[in-house]
Amino acid sequence: MGTFQHGVAALALGAALLAGGVAGASAQDDEGPNEVESPAAPATLDDGAELLPQAGISLEEAIAAAQGAAPGAVGEVDLEYAAGTLVFNVDVGDQDVHVDAASGAVVSVNADD
C-alpha cells in the first residue's frame, strides 16, 4: 500500500471514529441518564408551561402564596399534578411549597427534595 493510500485509510478511519463518537449526541432533552439540564432562572416556570391555561392563578400569585408559607429565596417553579391536583411546586429556601393552581391555597410545605 502506498503512502497516499495509507493517508486515505487513516483519514477514513478517523472520520469513522469521530462519527461514531457523536452519532448518539442530540440537542433534544431526552431525559436520559447523562442528561445535563441547565437550571431555570429563579422565580420562573421550569416545567409545566403547557399546563398554564388550566391554572386559575398566575405564576406571580403562586409565588406570593409560597413566600407567605416559607422563608427564603425563591428558586425554580414547576406546574404539575400532585395527588390528582394541579399545583405550582415552588422552591422557597429549603422548602417545596405546593400551591393549588386553581385557588391559590397552600396545599403543603415540605423539605426540598
Image (cartoon, helix red, strand yellow):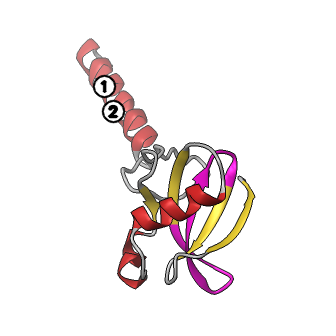
> The residue under label 2 is which amino acid type?
Ala
Element class at badge 2: helix
Question: Residue 87 in the image: x percent, y percent?
Answer: 56, 75
Mark 1–mark 2 CB contact (< 8 Å): yes
Q: Which residues are magenta?
A: 79-95
Residue at 33% over, 33% down: 15
> Dividing the image into 4 quarters, which one contains the N terminus?
top left
Residue 90 visible:
no
> The residue under label 1 is which amino acid type?
Leu
Element class at badge 1: helix
Residue at 28% over, 12% down: 3
Mark 1: few, some, or many residues within 10 Å (few <14, many ≥20)?
few
Q: Nearer the viewer, residue 57 or 85?
A: 57
Does residue 3 sit above or below 14 in this rendering? above
Residue at 69% over, 83% down: 83
Give me the disc on residue 15: 2
Question: Residue 57 in the image: x percent, y percent?
Answer: 42, 76
Mark 2: few, some, or many residues within 10 Å (few <14, many ≥20)?
few
Q: Nearer the viewer, residue 76 or 13?
A: 76
